[in-house]
Amino acid sequence: MPTLTLTAVWVNLVASGAGVSAQSDDSRAREYADAGEVRTYGEGRQRAVTAEGERGSFGFTLVDVTEDEITTLRDWKSQLVQVRDHRGRKFYGVYFSLSVSEPRVLLAANTYTVGVTVQFTTYTEGS
């Protein structure tokens, strides 16, 4: 049985299957939180207001990304994407912004560093 070894982070647009992949730096962070807030009512009473379920996100930084790949990632904002990392983990979600910067040390000419935080969504494959 063949084994697939990923050495990069892959971002695929679910609607078309098109993808962008790049190496990532070591700062890949997942976060999980309950959806809720504390509201203040009359006479200073405070109550927790929660929603069912858990919110999650996956933040990562892609390195050596070309301008064309940045344009593609910009086009995919607010659309459902699938993200796979080097460990084979798979996440579905959307992102609403990109953080593009020029690295201090250029590994390749005309490449950039791109920070992305994907907000998880519920998605069922093969439905």
Image (cartoon, rainbow, N blue to C red):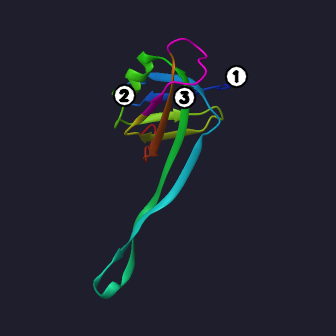
- For the residue carrying disc 2, how many other residues have a C-alpha within 10 Å: few (<14), some (14-19), or many (20+)? some
In the image, residue 41 lies at what x, y percent? 30, 81
The residue tagged with tag 3: helix, strand or loop? strand
The picture quadrant where one finds residue 108 is top right
Image height of 110 relative to 44, above or below? above
**What is the number of the mark on residue 2?**
1
Upstream in the sequence, badge 3 or badge 1? 1
Closer to us: 28 or 17: 28
Dominant secondary structure (helix, strand or loop) of the stretch shown in magenta: loop
Upstream in the sequence, badge 1 or badge 2? 1
Magenta stretch containing residue 109, yes or no? yes
The residue that appears at 53% across and 55% down in the rendered structure is 32
Residue, far bottom: 43
**Which amino acid type corresponds to the residue marked 3 in the rendered image?**
Leu
Q: What span is in magenta?
A: 99-110
Looking at the image, is mark 1 or mark 2 nearer the viewer? 2
Image height of 8 relative to 119, above or below? above
Closer to us: 51 or 23: 23
Upstream in the sequence, badge 3 or badge 2? 3
Reading the image, the residue beneath label 2 is 74
Pointer 3 with pointer 1, Cβ within 8 A: no
Magenta stretch containing residue 52, yes or no? no
- Asked whether, in this view, residue 109 is left or right of residue 93, the answer is right
Kindly report the distance in space between the C-alpha atoms of the residues bearing marks 1 and 2. 34 Å
**What is the number of the mark on residue 62?**
3
Residue, far left: 42
